[in-house]
Image (tube, rainbow, N blue to C red):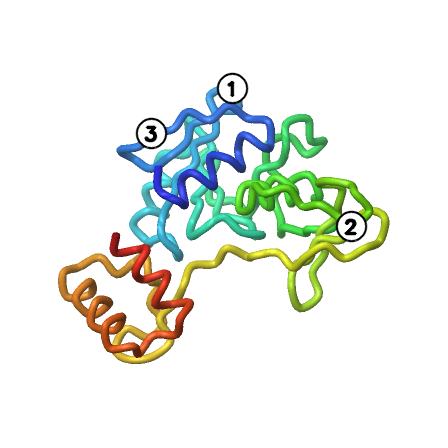
């Protein structure tokens, strides 16, 4: 599995599901719930959305576009495009899918599952409690211990984006053609990238 797939796999497991991974299709199947989840680029292509609509009569289809983060996704069910939604934990009163926007303060179990998939390291407060926190958002997403102490700001896990030049606005991980790879190598060697982008590009090209 690549990074995107492995994080979604961890997320699904953290929610209590037993995902079956298909490497060839970069997808997960939740057999008992009849839900099919497809990893794809952000935004999901128009063609992929059409295919999801066509194949949604047997299984509910969720397009996991982009990296795992705090958001809702395109959902297709019974041959129709639904309002955006997201998977809820096993035992949720909403059933498997909540149709609506993701709210970190209301959906704490789902939020916790995302945080643990993105950063599996234990979040420990100076009071000694481990993984006993709530997640809120002001400017940043942050973890605050239930005792009231701030623990840390949380990553939104959004992909690195090129901010200038002819590839401005492109996500680093989408640059896979020969010409794009050559550009990345040139940019690294020329020192035009920031330290963060350069390091990410080096890791990406390995």
Q: Which circle's residue, 2 or 3, is located before the other in the chain?
A: 3
Q: Nearer the viewer, residue 175 or 42?
A: 175
Q: Nearer the viewer, residue 193 or 3?
A: 193
Q: How many marks?
A: 3
Q: Which circle's residue, 3 or 1, is located before the other in the chain?
A: 3
Q: CA distance from mark 1 to mark 2?
A: 41 Å
Judge left or right: residue 120 versus residue 53. right
Q: Is residue 42 above or below residue 55?
A: below
Q: Which residue is mark 1?
A: 32
Q: Counting other residues with Cα less than 10 Å from the Cα at mark 2, is it few (<14), some (14-19), or many (20 or more)?
A: few
Q: Counting other residues with Cα less than 10 Å from the Cα at mark 1, is it few (<14), some (14-19), or many (20 or more)?
A: few
Name the residue located 73 percent from the left edge and 40 percent from the top edge.
Answer: 130
Q: Which circle's residue, 1 or 2, is located before the other in the chain?
A: 1
The circle on residue 126 is: 2
Q: Residue 193 in the image: x percent, y percent?
A: 34, 74
Residue with the most extreme top position: 32
Q: Which residue is mark 3?
A: 22
Q: Residue 188 in the image: x percent, y percent?
A: 27, 70
Q: Nearer the viewer, mark 3 or mark 1?
A: 3
Q: Secondary structure at mark 1?
A: loop
State the quadrant of the N terminus: top left
Name the residue located 26 percent from the left edge and 61 percent from the top edge.
Answer: 175
Q: Secondary structure at mark 3?
A: strand
Asked if the residue under mark 1 is in contact with the one under mark 3, i.e. CB atoms within 8 Å, the reply is no
Judge left or right: residue 35 versus residue 164. right
Judge left or right: residue 93 versus residue 33. right
Q: Residue 119 in the image: x percent, y percent?
A: 55, 46
Q: CA distance from mark 2 to mark 3?
A: 41 Å
Name the residue located 36 percent from the left edge and 61 percent from the top edge.
Answer: 200
């Amino acid at each position: 599995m690549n990074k995107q797939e492995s994080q979604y796999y961890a997320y699904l497991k953290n929610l209590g599901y037993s995902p079956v991974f298909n490497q060839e299709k970069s997808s997960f199947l939740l057999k008992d719930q009849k839900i099919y989840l497809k990893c794809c680029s952000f935004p999901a292509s128009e063609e992929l959305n059409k295919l999801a609509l066509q194949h949604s009569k047997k299984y509910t289809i969720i397009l996991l576009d982009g990296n795992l983060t705090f958001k809702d996704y395109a959902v297709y069910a019974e041959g129709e495009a639904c309002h955006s939604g997201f998977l809820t934990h096993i035992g949720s009163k909403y059933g498997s899918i909540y149709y609506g926007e993701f709210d970190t303060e209301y959906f704490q179990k789902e939020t916790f599952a995302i945080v643990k998939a993105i950063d599996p390291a234990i979040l420990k407060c100076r009071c000694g409690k481990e993984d006993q926190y709530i997640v809120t958002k002001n400017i940043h997403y942050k973890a605050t211990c239930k005792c009231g102490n701030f623990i840390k700001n949380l990553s939104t896990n959004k992909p690195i984006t090129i901010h200038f030049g002819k590839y401005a606005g492109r996500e680093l991980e989408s640059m896979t053609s020969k010409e794009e790879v050559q550009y990345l190598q040139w940019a690294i060697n020329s020192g035009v990238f920031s330290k963060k982008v350069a390091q990410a590009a080096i890791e990406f090209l390995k």
